[in-house]
Amino acid sequence: WEQTVSMGWAGTLQARDVGARSAKVLAVRRRDMDAAAYLGSSLHISCGKELARWEETEGRVDMLLRFEASGQGHVSLYLPACRQTPPRAQGAAYTGGEILPLCKQGGQPMDGAWKVPVAVCAGSVDLSLLF
């Protein structure tokens, strides 16, 4: 995954080069720019199928992630309450690593979009973000 996101576009969408025996996956969702959102993970191509539960309350997002295999990577989230400062993470899935900003195409950090490092085992694991 190139680990870039786009928060919308006008007109047409142009895909960059796709290599031989390769593919590009695009997740298109309607969303509220004032609400937190699960953008996907580097662990599964489904762009969200692994999200078994999502609960958003004041200053907190709790989620349950379900995977069929073990692995390490990150989940990508949009948290409008954390435009410049990363959230704090806790839960069985969180590795304790640095929470980094997601970047727009071109490499510029995108306000409120974060990559949270996770390690998962086959089955379900919890992850909470506090802000």
Image (tube, grey):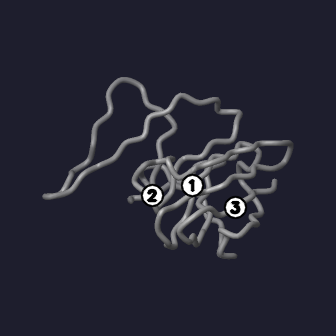
User: From this viewpoint, which residue is outermost toward the left?
Assistant: 20
Q: Quick check: marks 3 and 2 in contact, CB under 8 Å?
A: no
Q: Secondary structure at mark 2?
A: loop
- Label 2 crowd (10 A; few <14 / some 14-19 / many >=20): few
User: Of label 3 and label 1, which has the lower sequence position?
Assistant: 1
Give the residue drawn at x 50%, y 33%.
29
- The amino acid type, in three-letter code, at marker 2 is Gln
Q: Secondary structure at mark 3?
A: strand
Residue 43 numbered mark, or none: none
- Give residue 42's position: percent from left, percent from top: 46, 61
Between the residue at mark 3 and the residue at mark 2, the CA separation in whole angstroms equals 22 Å
Disc 1 or 2, which lies upstream in sequence? 2
In front: label 3 or label 1: 3
The x and y percentages for residue 13 are: 32, 33
Q: Which label was assigned to residue 76?
A: 1
Check the image and report above or below for 15 versus 87: above
| Residue type highlighted by circle 1 | Ser
Query: Which residue in the protein does label 3 denote?
Result: 126
Q: Amino acid at mark 3?
A: Asp
Quickly name the residue at label 2: 3
Q: Position of residue 46 (x, y in %)?
A: 42, 49
Q: Are marks 1 and 2 in contact (CB under 8 Å)?
A: yes
Residue toward you, 90 or 50: 50
On the picture, is 31 further left or further right than 80?
A: left
- Mark 3: few, some, or many residues within 10 Å (few <14, many ≥20)? some
Circle 3/circle 1 CB separation < 8 Å: no
User: How many numbered badges does the structure rendering display?
Assistant: 3
